[in-house]
Image (tube, grey):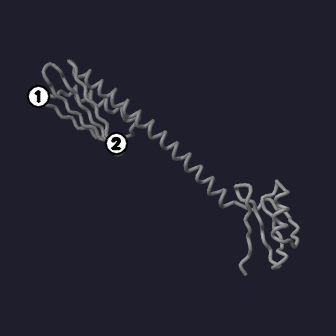
């Protein structure tokens, strides 16, 4: 924790320095020990202005408050900074939670892909049929979407299947 205190238009007392140090050190509970703070104190008319900027982990927080009492201005700044830090911390926690859920679901998908295996085996009796006979058999069976058969003309194993439109068919034939 580094604190730099600058004053403009008046003399800074040790009491104000220690007060700022004490108040800024309260931010350690949310930021940890690794942050820098710059406090600029000035007088504008009858108002005493306190501006505090805090930089921690790449984030910058800034608060400016003015009142007739410098101590009240410092207190307002600290309250504003604590609110900003809490808001950012909550936002980061939500983002991390979302990221962890996304990573977890991606891991589950990868595990499912890695662990895919054959869990069901269906045995078909393959009979020599013509394409037209295979189509008639598949039309008469609403449960099945495909039918393997041996083409009676070529003696090759083929598969006839129903297309998504529900009325047309496709045919798989081996090349060689």
The residue depicted at 36 percent of the width and 41 percent of the height is 33
Identity of the residue furthest to the left in this view = 9
From what the image shows, is residue 110 above or below residue 18? Answer: below
Q: Which of marks 1 and 2 is nearer the N terminus?
A: 1
The nearer-to-camera label among 1 and 2 is 2
Q: Quadrant location of the N terminus? A: top left
Q: Which of 123 and 115 is in front in this view?
A: 123
* Label 1 sits on residue: 9
- Total numbered circles: 2
Left or right, 149 with respect to 20, comes to right
From what the image shows, is residue 174 above or below residue 113? Answer: below
Label 1 neighbourhood size at 10 Å, few (<14), some (14-19), many (20+)?
few
Kind of element beneath mark 2:
strand
The residue depicted at 67 percent of the width and 56 percent of the height is 112
From what the image shows, is residue 137 above or below residue 105? Answer: below
The residue depicted at 15 percent of the width and 25 percent of the height is 43
- Residue 35 location (% of width, % of height): 33, 41
Left or right, 90 with respect to 80, comes to right
- Residue 27 location (% of width, % of height): 36, 33
The residue depicted at 82 percent of the width and 54 percent of the height is 143
- Residue 173 location (% of width, % of height): 74, 73
Q: Nearer the viewer, residue 66 or 140?
A: 140
| Quadrant housing residue 64 | top left
* Label 2 sits on residue: 59
């Amino acid at each position: 924790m580094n604190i730099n205190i600058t004053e403009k238009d008046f003399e800074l007392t040790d009491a104000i320095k220690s007060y700022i140090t004490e108040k800024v050190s309260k931010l350690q509970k949310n930021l940890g020990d690794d942050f820098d703070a710059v406090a600029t104190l000035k007088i504008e008319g009858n108002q005493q202005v306190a501006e505090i900027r805090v930089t921690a982990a790449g984030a910058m927080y800034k608060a400016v408050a003015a009142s007739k009492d410098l101590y009240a201005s410092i207190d307002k700044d600290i309250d504003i900074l604590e609110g900003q830090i809490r808001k950012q911390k909550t936002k980061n926690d939500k983002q991390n939670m979302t990221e962890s859920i996304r990573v977890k679901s991606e891991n589950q998908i990868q595990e499912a892909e890695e662990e895919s295996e054959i869990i069901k085996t269906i045995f078909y009796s393959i009979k020599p049929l013509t394409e037209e006979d295979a189509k008639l058999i598949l039309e008469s069976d609403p449960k099945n979407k495909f039918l393997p058969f041996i083409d009676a003309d070529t003696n090759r194993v083929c598969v006839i299947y129903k297309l998504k439109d529900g009325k047309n068919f496709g045919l798989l034939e081996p090349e060689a």
